[in-house]
Image (cartoon, grey):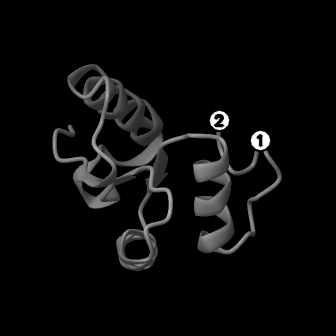
Amino acid sequence: MSVVDIDLRAAPDDIVYATAVEQARVVVTEDEDDFERILKQAFAAGDAVVPVVVVRKTRLSRGGAMPNSLARALHRWSVDNPEPYLGAHYLTDME
């Protein structure tokens, strides 16, 4: 599911994160700074927290192969982390 699927394409990151918390979903993002800030605030306030997977596109295959490369990397991550800890994760195993 993506932000496009749930009409949050242009929504602020705080809203995307709040929706993920409400729906108990994992966030996948390139926006490390904003989501680190959001997580830090949530932990400090004792609010609910979900896993956030940070992706760096520079480590993915270029061009038309990027979506497939990202999908494979996320699949490997989900298999390796069937019950991920709450907070930031960094997707490093990419082609």
- Around disc 1, counting alpha carbons within 10 Å, would you say few (fewer than 14), some (14 to 19), or many (20 or more)? few
Is 83 left or right of 31, judged from the image as shown?
Answer: left
Is 93 left or right of 31, judged from the image as shown?
Answer: left
> Where on the picture, by quarter, is residue 18?
bottom right
Quick one: which residue is furthest to the front in this view? Answer: 46
Find the distance from the CA under tag 1 to the CA under tag 2. Answer: 6 Å
| 76 lies above or below 65 | above
Residue at disc 1, secondary structure: loop
Badge 1 vs badge 2, beta-carbon distance below 8 Å: yes
Residue 5 numbered mark, or none:
1
- The picture places residue 33, in percent across and down from the top left corner, at 37, 79
- The picture places residue 38, in percent across and down from the top left corner, at 46, 74
> Where on the picture, by quarter, is residue 55?
bottom left
Residue marked by disc 2: 1
> Where on the picture, by quarter, is residue 73?
top left
Q: Amino acid at mark 2?
A: Met
Q: Quadrant of the N terminus?
A: top right
Q: Residue at x 45, y 56 (%)?
A: 49
